Amino acid sequence: MDFQQLFNDFSKIKVAVIGDVMLDTYWWGKVDRISPEAPVPVVAVTKREQRIGGAGNVALNLVSLGAHVNVLTVLGKDDDGEQLTTLFNQNNISAKYIVTSTDRITTNKIRIISRNQHMMRLDAEMQTDITQNDEEKLLYAFEEYIAAESPDIVILEDYNKGVLTQTVVTKIIALCKQHHILTAVDPKRKNFFSYVGVDIFKPNLKEAVEGLNILTDVVSLSLLKDIHLLLQEKLKHKISFITLSEKGVFYNDNNSSSLIPTHIRSIADVSGAGDTVIAVASLVYAATKNVKLMAEVANIAGGLVCEEVGTVAINKESLLKECEELLT
């Protein structure tokens, strides 16, 4: 396999990420006294930072690999929404088709950190479904996007914050089928079985067994094959791609299936690994239609980002080097 050529081809791929984006805010500070008003520490803030989070982290991974990326979502008509839009533009992610709404606030997760310890997290968010009016605006924006860009693949990234309603999911999948656009899904429990007819369905093992109400402590190839059949019965999708944490990944596309173990690494932080996996899997599959290769490269990418502290996007050169070393 010519991995250099494959990675070069990523620059030709157009991707839409649709789902729940959020602002990740970090406040760092020092604690050297207790408040006289209540028995709580006083954090003297020394540094503030705002980053793209949620479905936006999938977009960051895609851009890092060279793809052309648009984000479609519903943000609040507020300062946090404006800040997110600015961050998207700064990171070469198109925010042209984002919908803003007076009926919602933009999700902002504020982490207060001192001496490398999380002191507190403040979540400003709405978890209710977007309104019918916002659904219609988002679907109209998506139709405009398809007409203008002719994307290769659409990733539906669900964080249970209300953007991916049953109506939005059903209509987006139908539009993608109509226009021969590939679809990939990173689901959450609430709408787990809404994604009927997608190409790639990527839950983690916990989400899959909970969604199917299976009780198990043992991961085996036969169990995973059974999970695929049960999922396919309900979803009629093409490919099951299940992440298994430290045990690796499993794929099944009816023609072939395999459990691919992880490569030995020193794990620093698993946050954001799922975002990296769905981004890499989507690009490799869009470029090659090779399910085994998709799973192998995404497995390596997920392990690589776990070596870094915090949520980080995949480094293209590091991934290319590892693929050439481990897969050729």
Image: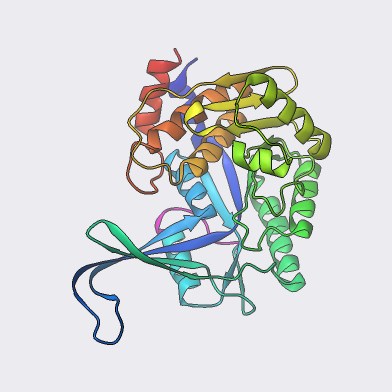
Q: In x, y percent, where is residue 237?
A: 76, 35
- Residue 290 visible somewhere in the drawing: no
In depth, the one of 145 and 194 nearer the eye is: 194
Number of disc labels: 0
Q: Residue at x 71, y 23 (%)?
A: 225
Q: In x, y percent, where is residue 270?
A: 42, 42
Query: What is the quadrant of the C terminus in the image?
Result: top left
The secondary structure that most of the magenta stretch takes on is: loop
Q: Is 122 situated above or below 297?
A: below
Q: In x, y percent, where is residue 78?
A: 51, 78
Q: Is 126 situated above or below 228?
A: below
- Residue 244 visible somewhere in the drawing: yes
In the picture, measured across the screen, residue 80 lies left or right of residue 265, that is: right
Q: Residue at x 59, y 64 (%)?
A: 98
Q: In x, y percent, where is residue 107?
A: 52, 68
Range shown magenta: 90-97
Q: Residue at x 67, y 69 (%)?
A: 128
